[in-house]
Image (spheres, rainbow, N blue to C red):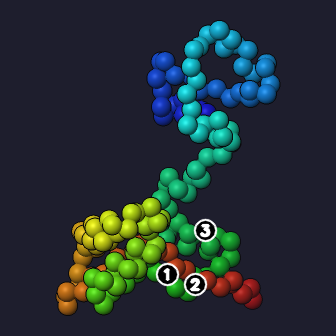
Amino acid sequence: MIAIAKKQNFHPKIEYSVASIEDWSTVKQWKEQMTKVISIHCFHWGVDDCVPDSHHHKYDALYYKKMLESIGFEVLHSKERKIDVFSSDEDIKNFFTALCVLTPHVPLNRKEDFQNDLLEELLLHNGRDSNGMPYHDGKILELVVRKKIKN
């Protein structure tokens, strides 16, 4: 993680290091060298904890199909998109408000505004069907596989 931070967030006045305040030998080089250390959460980073490659590569369905086939599975069904049509604006607002992690932090007197803003964004990114009903167009990966039977 330190190597990634050095590469992606380089600045001549920033030094990324691994140290433990409990082990003086890892911090003694900074004695009387600085006046402040500011950190929001990096003291809690695990040095080897990183986001997995699959998060950055955005692998598509073909990648996973080939992977499963390479280890002896046969892909019987594949689905990469799911469109859910809601019966009303109120239904889609209620559904996504229930899922949204921000909802509990919205003051009661602003909840209706929040739901309306959420609906506006949902419609902007998804839309309405030919009957005027709001829908959500979701990217999913659904694979049904079975182990190949050897003859």
- Indicate whether 50 appears above or below 88: above
13 vs 34, left or right, is left
Which quadrant is home to the N terminus? top right
Q: Indicate the amino acid at tag 3.
A: Met
Of labels 3 and 2, earlier in sequence is 3
Which quadrant is home to the C terminus? bottom right
Residue with the mark numbered 1: 78
Residue with the mark numbered 2: 144
Q: Position of residue 143 (x, y in %)?
A: 55, 80
Q: Position of residue 131 (x, y in %)?
A: 20, 90
| Residue 59 appearing in the image | yes
Cβ atoms under marks 2 and 1 closer than 8 Å: yes
Q: Position of residue 129 (x, y in %)?
A: 23, 85
Q: Dot 1: what SS?
A: strand
Q: Dot 2: what SS?
A: strand
**Badge 1: how crowded within 10 Å, few (<14), some, or many (20+)?**
some
Of labels 2 and 1, earlier in sequence is 1
Taking the spot 60% from the left edge, 68% from the top edge, the residue there is 67
| Residue 121 appearing in the image | no
Q: CA distance from mark 2 to mark 1?
A: 7 Å
Residue with the mark numbered 3: 67
- Indicate whether 107 appears above or below 14: below
Of labels 3 and 1, earlier in sequence is 3
121 vs 102, left or right, is left
Q: Indicate the amino acid at tag 1.
A: Ser
